[in-house]
Image (tube, helix red, strand yellow):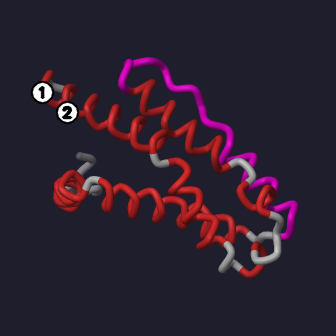
Amino acid sequence: MSEAQFSVASAHALAIKSFLRRFRTEILAEWRRLAREIPVARDMPSVSLVDHLPELLDEVASVAEQLLNDRALDMPDAARRHAVDRLGAGFDISAVVHELSLLRRCILRNYSVSFPRTYRSCSMQCSKTSWSSGS
């Protein structure tokens, strides 16, 4: 990785970390509203519904920080614990995956609203990336 690429990657990692910490409340509020549409989650108490998601957002921000500081990654654990708890509460695997995809949607929507120019630039860059070529 060139110095310029490293600099850009560091800037993205810092932006991700800062964004997740700054907009955590908004992301979780939107996610909570959307998650209530999942039939098995509809009548869950709010505390049970949110479960490990605040911790999961913190872990993603920490991973970004670790990448920024070029440290070895601590393996996040909140997503696994959240999934295990959900399966024990009667969710099937598709509902768990749907919950996490809703979280991703909320993160991206909040980012696109808060930083529209950066989001468009990143979206354009990602659409040019070829997953099959490994770049």
Mark 1 secondary-structure assignment:
helix
110 and 124: which is toward the camera: 110
Q: Is residue 50 left or right of residue 72?
A: right
Report the magenta residues as a range: 68-90
Q: Residue at x 51, y 26 (%)?
A: 73
Q: Is residue 84 left or right of residue 24?
A: right
Q: Residue at x 27, y 47 (%)?
A: 134
Mark 2 secondary-structure assignment:
helix
Q: Residue at x 48, y 32 (%)?
A: 63
Mark identifier at residue 8 = 2
Residue 57 in the image: above or below residue 8: below
Q: Amino acid at mark 1?
A: Ala
- Image quadrant for the N terminus? top left
Q: Is residue 85 magenta?
A: yes
Q: Position of residue 100 (x, y in %)?
A: 59, 61
Residue 109 in the image: above or below residue 40: above
Q: Position of residue 30 (x, y in %)?
A: 54, 65
Are the two marked residues, 1 and 2, in contact with CB atoms closer than 8 angstroms?
Answer: yes
Q: What residue is pinned by disc 1?
A: 4
Q: Amino acid at mark 2?
A: Val
Q: CA distance from mark 1 to mark 2?
A: 6 Å
Residue 59 in the image: above or below residue 38: above
Q: Residue at x 52, y 48 (%)?
A: 24
Q: Bin the neighbour count of mark 2 within 10 Å (Cα to Cα): few under 14, some 14-19, many 20 and up.
A: few
40 and 92: which is toward the camera: 40
